[in-house]
Image (cartoon, rainbow, N blue to C red):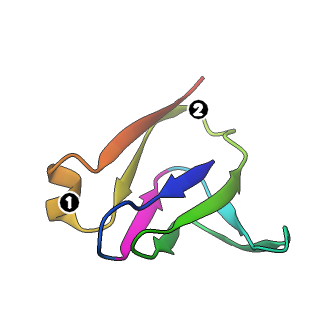
């Protein structure tokens, strides 16, 4: 999955219910985490195994941004 930040500010992105690894430029996998920081105008690839059934929120970690629409749901059957 690719996280894209097309704003002029860095944003932390948080996934509930699962953990993921960031993919480095060389293709190696980073540490297991549930939040990543995406710099302004950048993108970040992550690898996640969605194996926890439920409806999980994926959102920018600043509440005002999440309320403003920078959020979505991940539905895992």
Quadrant placement of the C terminus: top right
> Label 1: few (<14), some or many (≥20) within 10 Å?
few
Tell me which corner region of the image, top left, top right, bottom left or bottom right, holds residue 64: bottom left
Q: Residue at x 36, y 40 (%)?
A: 72
Question: How far across and how far down the image is residue 36, in percent?
Answer: 52, 71
> Label 2: few (<14), some or many (≥20) within 10 Å?
few
Establish if 16 lies above or below 44.
above
Mark 1 → mark 2, Cα distance in angstroms: 26 Å
Most prominent secondary structure in the magenta stretch? strand
Question: How far across and how far down the image is residue 56, in percent?
Answer: 44, 41
Which range is magenta? 10-16
State which mark lies toward you, 1 or 2. 1
Magenta stretch: includes residue 71: no
Establish if 23 lies above or below 47.
below
Sequence order check, earlier mark of 1 and 2: 2
Which residue is tagged 1? 65
Q: Is residue 1 left or right of residue 47?
A: left
Q: Nearer the viewer, residue 65 or 6?
A: 6
Which element is circle 2 on?
Answer: loop
Q: Nearer the viewer, residue 30 or 3?
A: 3
Q: Residue at x 23, y 54 (%)?
A: 66
Tell me which corner region of the image, top left, top right, bottom left or bottom right, holds residue 29: bottom right
Residue 53, labelled with which disc? 2
Q: Residue at x 32, y 47 (%)?
A: 71
In the displayed image of the protein, which residue is found farthest to the top? 77
Magenta stretch: includes residue 14: yes
């Amino acid at each position: 999955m690719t996280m894209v930040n097309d704003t002029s500010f860095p944003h932390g992105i948080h996934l509930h219910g699962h953990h993921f690894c960031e993919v480095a430029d060389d293709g190696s996998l980073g540490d297991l985490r549930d939040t990543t920081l995406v710099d302004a105008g950048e993108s970040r690839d992550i690898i996640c195994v969605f194996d926890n059934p439920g409806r999980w929120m994926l959102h920018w970690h600043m509440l005002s941004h999440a309320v403003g629409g920078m959020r979505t749901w991940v539905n895992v059957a």
